[in-house]
Amino acid sequence: MNAEVLNNEGVKFFFDGNLINARLKYEEALVKEPNYATTLNNLGMLCLQEKKFDEAIAYFQKAIKEKDCATYRLNMGHALCNIKKLKEAEEQYKLSIIFNDNLLDGWKSLASLYQVQKRYHEAIKIWVEIIENKSNDPLYKIYLAKDYIKIEEYQNALYVLSKASQQEKYLDLTWYYTALIHFNKQNFDLAKEAIKNAVGIKPNNESYRSLLATIYLCISDSNAAFQEWKYVLLLNPSNEQVRIDRAVTLLSQKLTKEALQDLTHVLIINKNNLKALFYKALTRLEITKDDPEAIKTLKMLSKGKNEYSNKAKEVLSKI
């Protein structure tokens, strides 16, 4: 069998999830043709799947040396992202687009990289380019709206979402981000209406239910909020954020025993959840003013460099 046939057999194994046999076939192909760029690239992809990122980069470099093209540059960018070499990854994504201006994954990867780096204005330019010249998929409009939200350009975000809402796909996400904008602007009635539309489309989405609960709290309807939290925790008992949100509300209502149960549950799942540690300490102090375990926790938090350090110091100063 020649290298191409062996490579194609390896591809079949790869897509079936059989990475061991895929590697064997790829290696057989390279015995036949050591510089076969397609197989070198495929071995790089296999290494990406195995999280062997340095090995993946080595294969992509060899593939590029034999045949420089958009796909290999794109894959190299993915590997570099995984080892946090973001500047180098950006260069590879840009090269992939230079090789093939219509490579949608190249444009998308570049925009996503800018998002990770909080370079939202640059990401916005990419999404606009995709929407205007590359794809009519409403998902890209939603990505664009998300970045407008990040820089608090809410009117631009609403305009983009209104365009996305004219298409049938991803309507739940369109409503969710519309709700988030109204929530950030404290238009709680509009936010509630929008998020209920999202919940109506996907009733089991935890993020949608959680936002609805938060909106209910903002309009002083804690009973409705508790119902939403209850629904979410039936779906996912390990949802840490919902348990903490519910515990904080329970604590505000002096229901310390119930609050303590939720916070303890979170810390069993994740003993390093700082927010749960802080509020558990507050709850224990509410029960017993000089609770030694609570004081110990607050002292630990106060010595760290985290968002609860100063809060812990403030509580300790009042004991």
Image (cartoon, rainbow, N blue to C red):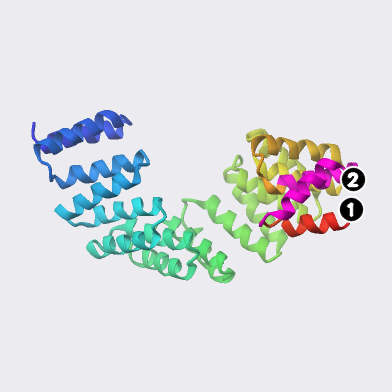
Position of residue 185 in the picture relative to residue 163 (left or right) = right
Position of residue 237 in the picture relative to residue 249 (left or right) = left
Q: Is residue 179 magenta?
A: no
Residue behind mark 1: 319
Q: Badge 1, how many Cα within 10 Å: few under 14, some, many 20+?
A: few
User: Looking at the image, is 310 positioned above or below residue 23?
Assistant: below
Residue behind mark 2: 290
Query: In the figure, residue 272 lies in which quadrant?
Result: top right
Q: Amino acid at mark 2?
A: Asp
Q: Is residue 317 visible?
A: yes
Q: Main secondary structure of the magenta part?
A: helix
Residue shown at the point (75%, 44%) measured from the top left: 246
Q: Are marks 1 and 2 in contact (CB under 8 Å)?
A: yes
Which type of secondary structure does the marked residue at label 1 adopt? Answer: loop
Position of residue 273 in the picture relative to residue 255 (left or right) = left
Foreground: 278 or 150?
A: 278
Q: Amino acid at mark 1?
A: Ile
Q: Position of residue 134 (x, y in %)?
A: 33, 62
Position of residue 258 in the picture relative to residue 289 (left or right) = left
User: Looking at the image, is 176 positioned above or below residue 114?
Assistant: above
Q: Position of residue 105 (x, y in %)?
A: 33, 55
Count how many numbered circles sit on residues in the image: 2
Region rendered in magenta: 276-305
Q: Badge 2, how many Cα within 10 Å: few under 14, some, many 20+?
A: few
Q: Position of residue 240 (x, y in %)?
A: 66, 42
Q: CA distance from mark 1 to mark 2?
A: 7 Å
Foreground: 142 or 82?
A: 82
Please tell me which of labels 1 and 2 falls first in the chain.
2
Residue shown at the point (89%, 42%) measured from the top left: 287
Q: Position of residue 104 (x, y in %)?
A: 32, 57
Residue shown at the point (42%, 70%) measured from the top left: 125
